Image (cartoon, coloured by chain):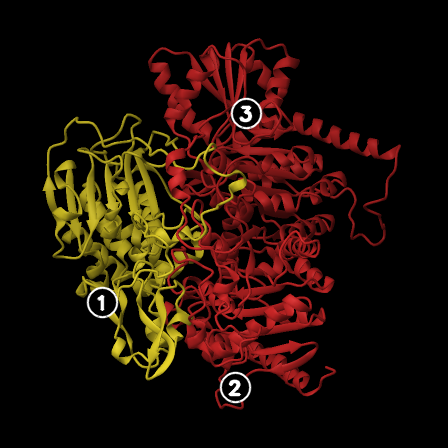
Amino acid sequence: MQECKQIIEFASGNEMASMAIKQIGYDLMGYYPITPSTQIAENLDLMKAEGNLDLIMIAAEGEHSAAGICYGAAVGGGRVINATSANGLLYALEQFPVQSGTRFPMVMNVACRTVSGPLSIKGDHSDIMYMLNVGWPILFAHSAQQVYDFNIVALKLAETVRLPVVVAYDGFFTSHQKRRCMRFEHDEDVRNFIGEKHEPYPFLDLEHPITIGSYMNEPDLINNRYQLHLAMEEAKNVLPKMFDEYGTLCGRSYKWCEGYCHEDAETLLVLLGSSFDTATVAVDRLRKQGRKVGVLTLGALRPFPEEELAEILRYASHILIADRQDSYGGVGGNFSMEIRAVMQKYGCAGKVKSLVYGLGGKDFYVEDAITMFDMAEEESPDNLFYYGVEKGNSQQAELEKQQFFAPLSAEKTRILQQSNQVTGGQINQTTAMPKRLAPGHGACPGCGIPVNINMLLRAIEDPVVLLFQTGCGMIVTTPYPKTSFKVPYLHNLFQNGAATLSGLAEICYRKQEKGELPRGDIVFIMVSGDGGMDIGMGSALSTAMRGHRLLMFEYDNGGYMNTGYQFSYSTPKGAVSATSHVGRCQFGKRYFHKDMPQLMAAANIPYVATVAESNPVDFIKKAAKAADYAKKEGCAYVKAISACPLNWNDAPDKERKVIEAAVDCCYFPLYEVERGITTLSYDPHKSGKKIPVLDWLSMMGRTKHLKNNEYNAVVESLQEEVDRRFQCLLAKSENPYL
Amino acid sequence: MEKKVVLPITDENGYYQIRLESIGGLGANLCGKMLGELGIKYLGLNSASFSSYGSEKTGTPVKGFIRYSSADLDIKLHSPIKTPHLLVIFHDALLSDTSVLKGCGSDTDIIVNTVNGKDRQELLELEDYHCVYFLDAQKIAIETKSRINVVMLGAIAKVMGFVELEDLNAICKDTLGRKYPASLSQNMEGIRRGYEEVDIAFESDRSKSPKGNKNEEESIWGYETAPIGGINPCFGNSVVNDLSPSRQGYFPIFIPEKCINCGLCDTTCPDMVFQFQKGEFKGREMMLNKGLDYYHCKGCLRCVTVCPVQALVRGVEAEHPHKKYFMPNQELLRNPDNYEKAGYDGYITSEAFLTEQRIKGGEV
């Protein structure tokens, strides 16, 4: 084989992954957006919109389902790709052994990121180490170039040993930083290298039906697992050969273990990912001073390159293993433990130390690497060391703890000094309600989230406890060490807010019953948005059906805004987003917006309502009502349409008008379902304000393109759907049994 | 036409380093990307670029980092740039926090986007740096119907001294031209004017004197002082953030004589700016609008649109140095020792969509 023609790209790791995926020619991508891996799907969607890519892309409602979609497609014989990070990876975790245990190849990119909580989106290796035991080979790329190359090698490896393969790399450091990279000019060169896909057991061959996923007891299971072990052993054999073969095509030769100045090094620093490159700069500096230092990293975590590693490690007298994650309570991070095990197995005599560094994306400078070399050579006991932690300043911390506000006692929020429900028409009166949210949050100018939260809470005179699911609302209000909440506040991840709040509420009620907490009304409120009712719908519906006394409030901004606006299930059809681009072959989002209030109504909870800031009196009344139901009867659900000037791409000061148009065109009808009885709160037909849905769409940059005649069919279908849904509501409002 | 630019100055690793200091929304991210691509495609250099990403602490402005090296050198560092050769400040409000100047010294060239006529000496100590340049990029962007980032790009190229206008035009065509041919000539005009109008205010010889202070500040919250579990007991302490840098030149002006105290402004304000107190209006006891907490007003002007009686109107902030009816949050038990200047969170975890919006000239 001879070298194939290549061209230069200035690209990030995510971009190079997308390029490889495009060139390989996958059949299907099942995914769910999560930072920092999301760009892969975004880039691919853009290629697709422009007609440069033939790939089925399915945005699941969560990573667990995304893994399921991928599994099904792999079983069907498709070439399948996924990309994820951090908690997304963990959410899907149970699916990974299913895929490897039943031996269906695919490739998944993991842009490594720290696992919550406290929630952080930055890079470390705490996610990828959860993958060590699931039976997937794990290639680890430390540069954007390697992300590309490893993606190509990964699929060939996967199909050769019939195992799914991970390509991992550092979130942000590798995924987002742009570098000079090379790629093959012609897709055929990539495809020729990978070769045809062979299916030993074609599932869709109806002449030869097969069963996949038997129920298996002893004595069989251990044999199945041994087969998996053997496949991993085979991967050990074929991977170096594949790297060599690939090297002849591109001129870049890869080794399982990559070292720099390691051959004669007396002191070795071993680390994973992008830090390797930074450490090589430190090595250059120290070598100039005559110090025999070197640095080492691995190109794969599974299978683990024990022999190659031992070969390098046996000559060093001091070895420091730096982990970007910890196996808390173990003898270091997982990387560290495995390297120590290899050293023991092969009788390497060097002195070893382990440290944990760079968690949550804490930057790694050349100076840090130099310090680590010093530490490696120091006479000190082999205790696990956390590098870069700080004690803090206790004197100043005490000062910081002085509160700025008095706690919001129940008396302070009983502004009307009257019964539980605000009766309406009293906006002026509600300005007396102390805000539960302090100013100084980081939401964009004109953001609808704080507007809606304040509108909801100004109607509730009882003490409130808030739980936010992940989303913009949560991120902009609680960047440590600041918080905008003046009331008890809890965050839990995107898919689990409702369940968490139900547990919290029940404990409160129990404590009150036992007399451990004073009796008094507390309204428990779960706040969700940014598509939280996609991944969190199961939890929310089930919580609703269990009948807990709590209020679920959804600010629906129609997209995953906290991760840079990928479409959510409630994004309007036709809207452009980072995963529904407009192009020659695509008009924006393909399907209609989700009707969450009706889903909640079908759970037969006592109160469901939709609200909009353009109708403040109605909003306040419904909020008060919902709180009352949540206190006394059961679950209440309130949904507001919430403006996002950044991603709706309209002017911040016009948002209330845009919301009003959404209501007037019946895209977002205002109504309530009280104990099963539907009442329309506002009928734009009757007040002569009904407008076509296109009038609303034209107000936002994300849907403005739909004005063009070529999108008439899209607009018509949306108009029809909106009208149909409104007619349904109308019928329901006229008949108590509907 | 293969060019091979020789970098005028590099650090010990062989890199020429640029740091962009910006507020989410001014397009520094795209500017950095274009600079990086420029190096590889048109200057015969190697380059790397990236931004500070994601949900930084509220108000942490956006930073961009670009490293150039000769083409034969690999750029191995992934860490942010502490000691830049060129510091570019996309908005002079950022200078109210001196940490943007961290690591800059007599080796550093600085470009500041500021309105013409502002007291430049008041913004920073010119003599501490190698050269300091000023530019009214906002004005040029408005006049040319381009964006601040392309105007700054022109200025950056001029100041670096090794980039010609034609190279900038080429990269502008590559990045913006293919998808948005309509706005290409406007953007190129913005670049040209940035290139030509950037104005040197101070110049000194390069000397070997040490760079600025590199020491990191000691953090207050560490493993001994922070409550376990990331718990935050200081409720509502985001109030110490001063969000006025989020404003883009405009702010709401209050005309109390017209106010009917309907409270609609309070329902539309995302930032809890309006301060209502009990009082009497037209003989009725009710809540009265007493003023605005401008520390927290981000200038979205929602209130101006919503006000039914024009008691709130849009004003140009520069024309109102002393804000009338400025009323800090009335629920505060104590005033913060100092309000910390901050912007809103610049979300750039995902580039694709925002980049497009910026190119289209959307309100990003």
| Quadrant of the snapshot with the N terminus of chain B | top left
* Quadrant occupied by the C terminus of chain B: bottom left
Res. A573 in view: no
Q: Secondary structure at mark 3?
A: loop
- On whether disc 1 and disc 2 are found on a single subunit, the reply is no
Three-letter amino acid code at disc 1?
Answer: Lys
Amino acid type shown at disc 3? Lys
Label 3 sits on residue = A255
State which tag comes first along the sequence, 2 or 3: 3
Tell me if residue A80 comes above or below residue A307 in the rendering.
below
Q: Position of residue B317 (x, y in %)?
A: 22, 64
Q: Is residue A353 left or right of residue A365?
A: right
Local packing at callout 2 (Cα closer than 10 Å; few below 14, some 14-19, many 20+) is some
Q: Nearer the viewer, residue A370 or A417?
A: A417
Could you tell me the amino acid type at mark 2? Answer: Pro
Q: Which residue is mark 2?
A: A684
Question: At 58% across and 46% down in the image, what residue appears?
Answer: A83
Q: Residue B358: horizontal and vertical position, in percent?
A: 35, 59
Dot 1: few (<14), some (14–19), or many (≥20) neighbours within 10 Å?
A: few
Disc 1: host chain = B
